[in-house]
Image (cartoon, rainbow, N blue to C red):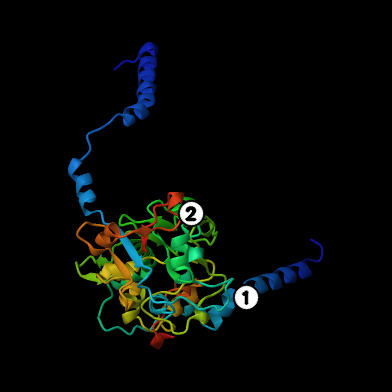
Amino acid sequence: MEIDRRKFLQITGLTFLALAAKPAFDLLPRPVAANASSASQAEAKRWAMAIDIEACKEGCTDCITACHRIHNVPDIGNRKEEIKWVWKDSFANSFPEQENRLVESTFQGRSVLLLCNHCDNPPCVRVCPTQATWKRDDGIVMMDYHRCIGCRYCMAACPYGSRSFNWKDPRPYINEVDDSYPTRTRGVVEKCDFCEERLARGDIPACVEACKYGALIFGEMKPEMEVYKVISSNFTLRRKAELGTQPQIYYIL
Amino acid sequence: MYDSGKVILGVAVFLCLASFPAWYNVITSKADYRPDPVIVVSDNQCIESTQYMREYHMQLLKEWRDDAVRNGKTIYTASDNKTYEINLTGTCLKCHSNKTEFCDTCHDFSGVSPNCWDCHNIPKSGK
């Protein structure tokens, strides 16, 4: 086929035009595989926890002990470097924005169990530069210690202080290392992960299992689940809900 | 060439010294050294063929890591359709329980220091 100059320029021009139009074409709405999205919607789980402040026994640390034992959380013995997944603090410190004096006086002096809130809108995930922390489809805010570079942006972003940094090798500070769960290393941030390894086996989180008083209720946010029922039928507080992080730990008053 | 004797002698001495590591290893037969990892296994074969594991265990472990941590996948299906739990301490070290005689032999020889063990536990018996 003979191509003259005019023909060549025409074809070249058309090619560039088609390439330039491609991004615009990509933006056009396309029929989506409808069944795929609706199926994942139906399967979408959402784990949540309710904590009954009244039922939680003062001075009892069974849940903390159980969690920290199975997850090899070290006891550094120094508040500046402490590592914690679950811990207790006073009501006033846990809910500083509560200005209802009656509530304040009822719960004054009571300690509240605190842990990662597994927010629907987690600020730690937004700031992580390596995606070492991310939100799973079932709502668990996960940590990938392999990817964590120890920048501690997430610690600055978390409004709940749920994250701890390993300033030094934690191994010497673990009383008895549980071989079935890895330890962490120096320079990574760690936190509660709702016992995702136990959930994968079909168990409930260790803290819920360890609680003798039934103060911790865990489950999927579905109308037929107990956690859903207690949250919807009681007055609950969430920590710093006004920040819009949508925490998924509900405190029953 | 002036002082050719000295120059040639100097070059010869230099070559001898520069090639010292090579001929020293040949003479003492250290060059023949091959690491010999001791395998204590209950099964006859690892999850894939020995050759594959030798060459690609690092890639396989990285896949396992991403599957287990990020993709929520806990079961690995091998090429012979056998399934294994994705678990370094639980699955790999169940057979290869002797880290010092198995993993370390080759890793030390090839000068690599994988940081798996900073966090992952070695069962008590293998320490």
Q: Quadrant of residue A216?
A: bottom left
Instruction: Please state which of residues A212 and A99 is positioned toward the viewer in this rendering.
Output: A99
Asked whether disc 1 touches disc 2, contact meaning CB atoms under 8 Å apart, the reply is no
Residue A199 is tagged as: none
Packing grade of label 2 (10 A; few <14, some 14-19, many >=20) is many
Chain that bears disc 1:
B
Q: Measured from the top left, where is residue B76 in percent x and y?
A: 26, 66
* Residue at image location 74% in from the left, 70% down from the top: B10
Residue B20 is tagged as: 1
Residue A240 to residue B117: above or below: above
Left/right of residue A217 with respect to residue B109 in the rendered view: left
Answer yes or no: is residue A38 visible.
yes
Amino acid at the residue labelled 1: Phe
Identify the secondary structure beneath mark 2. Answer: loop
Answer yes or no: is residue A220 visible.
no
* The C terminus of chain A: image quadrant: bottom left
* Residue at image location 48% in from the left, 68% down from the top: A108
Q: Quadrant of residue B66?
A: bottom left
Residue A128 is tagged as: 2
Q: Measured from the top left, where is residue A52 in percent x and y?
A: 35, 68
Q: Measured from the top left, where is residue A153 in percent x and y?
A: 53, 56
* The N terminus of chain A: image quadrant: top left
